[in-house]
Amino acid sequence: MGFRKNICHTTCLLMLPALVISCSTNTAGTKQTAAQAQPSRSQIEKAKVAELQVVDCLLPGQVRRLGNTSYMTPRRPTRTTASDCRIRGGEYVEFDRADYKTALKVWMAAAESGDAEAQVNVGEIFERGLGGSPNYAAAVIWYKKASEQGNSRAQFNLGTLYERGLGVEKSQLKALNLYRKAWGLPEDDVIYQSAAYKESQQLRAELKKQIDEKNGQINLLQRQIQDLQNKMSSQADTNQEAAGQLKLELTQLRNWVNKLEQEKKSTETQFETLPVFREPKPVRVAAKKSDSGAGDAKDLQFGKYYALIIGNQEYSNLENLFSPRRDATEVANLLESKYGFAVKSLIDASNVEVMQAINDLNDELTEKDNLLVFYAGHGSRIQSGELEDGYWLPVNADAPPTDTFWVPNEFVTRHLARLKAKRVLVVADSCYSGLLSSAPGYLFVGEGQQYTDDYIRYKLPKKSRLLLASGGDKPVLDNAGGNNSVFAKAFLEELRKNDSILSGPELFIRIRDKVRVGSRTVGYEQEPEFKAIKGAGHEVGDFFFVPVANLKG
């Protein structure tokens, strides 16, 4: 068994005797300075990387004329590459993840004037912390301002904070309602009603259990109080010290009872305010697409499909891997031949090659297009305060503790946010690949629902930025899938046998159990994840795999 590299600034936790571990450890032999690893590093290359970074840019105002009068419009905030900002005469600060104040200066004026998009950006800056500590309470304030204006990205982001209880009191129902708004679903929609009923029933059961437990605790304490009072009555002639101790115990017990009574009252209030469904509606059961390709795509406009495939296997300063080249090649061939993707492949790519390819996508894609980014190779994480950041490691990456040439997840996210493509799916098969998104696991509104033609028609016009990760914040296997990784094997198998329109959630459900079972055969637990990529412009859309045969008349 082997692992995709989990380069960390801590020693790898998993060291099993029968495994080929591809996790670099912080031994003295691997500690290298940047100068030792790359003594001839070119200043030109460093400048190129800086040019490719997405920055918060203030474009100059425009000179406009009204009659005989000329005037200058206010400066306009935008996110673009440092190179583009400079060409357009904009002002920006060199990209610095640790200094969120410079980014706030760009967006705050527009946010305070009521611009919803700027308000969401300010909320995301506070939520991420940009190298510091997240300020969830501040993020909530700005998300609420934008959400009240109907901004779907703000509604989604705010929902994720309610779902996890960050900056607000945790509430699954509030989260679900915000997701509903972001979806554009009416309150009486059967999918939302079914999910809300299910969540409400679960929460009702939990609150009822808490109320019963507090009643039991209060009754027990009341009996103890009564016993103490009886003891005091029967020992009326005891010394003052003993009597004082009994009174102190009684006071403590009564204070405890009062606290429990207040907690019970608060829980009862939550219980009483839960929605009550007199006759909950079932999820609409529509005819599902057949395996033979019903769910006709001929009258649907999916747009063009593009894929950027990255397979890093032969490393200069790290252990080589077993399967990324084969995984990347097979995925590229399958997407091109069966699903009609225009594919660009990078095999054993450097950081500049990876970053340049991601940057170039912005000039190739239109608002109607689809993009799949597949990455197989070493992955890494670095803990910084309360935040944990993930990285893709190109073939020229330095070994830890030097993180030179590592490609941050934030670079990928910020570029995805500026892409014009309607639908984007990142498929990441590397250690800590789940760190690409801070969103909670994908909320399936009515997970048992059918992925019908109606579902496709509803989701198709909505923007999506989704992540299908081979694992969460843990190492992942580099083998256990024959000639492929365990994740790539499941991914390829499901796409090969599919003959109908296949949605992202449906693909995830199909491969999830296969990865679980496959990893257990070598004594390891690997759990894939599927979720939205926060901060990249997700609007609760979906990604669809459409076989070429379904598009031919």
Image: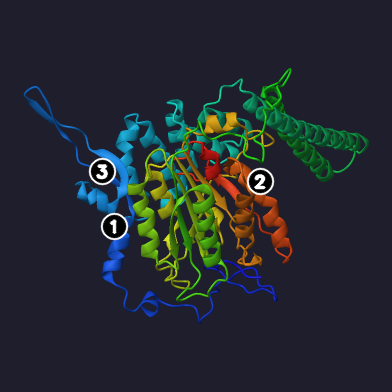
Image x and y of residue 229, in percent: 87, 34
Pick the front one: 150 or 228: 150
Image x and y of residue 153, in percent: 46, 35
- The residue tagged with tag 3: helix, strand or loop? strand
| Res. 98 in view | no
Alpha carbon distance from label 3 to label 1: 16 Å
| Residue matched to label 2 | 509
- Three-letter code, disc 1: Glu
- Tell which residue pokes out farthest to the left in this image: 68
Q: In the image, is 383 to the left or to the right of 164?
A: left
Residue in view at x 66 percent, y 28 percent: 196
Q: In the image, is 446 to the left or to the right of 33?
A: right
How crowded is the residue under tag 1: few (<14 C-alpha within 10 Å), some, or many (20+)?
Answer: some
**The N terminus - image quarter:** bottom right
- Three-letter code, disc 3: Leu
Alpha carbon distance from label 2 to label 1: 39 Å
- The residue tagged with tag 2: helix, strand or loop? helix
First in residue order: circle 3 vs circle 1: 1
- Three-letter code, disc 2: Ile
| Residue matched to label 3 | 58
Residue in view at x 86 percent, y 37 percent: 224
Which-is-in-front pick, marks 3 and 2?
A: 2
Residue in view at x 66 percent, y 30 percent: 195
| Residue matched to label 1 | 51
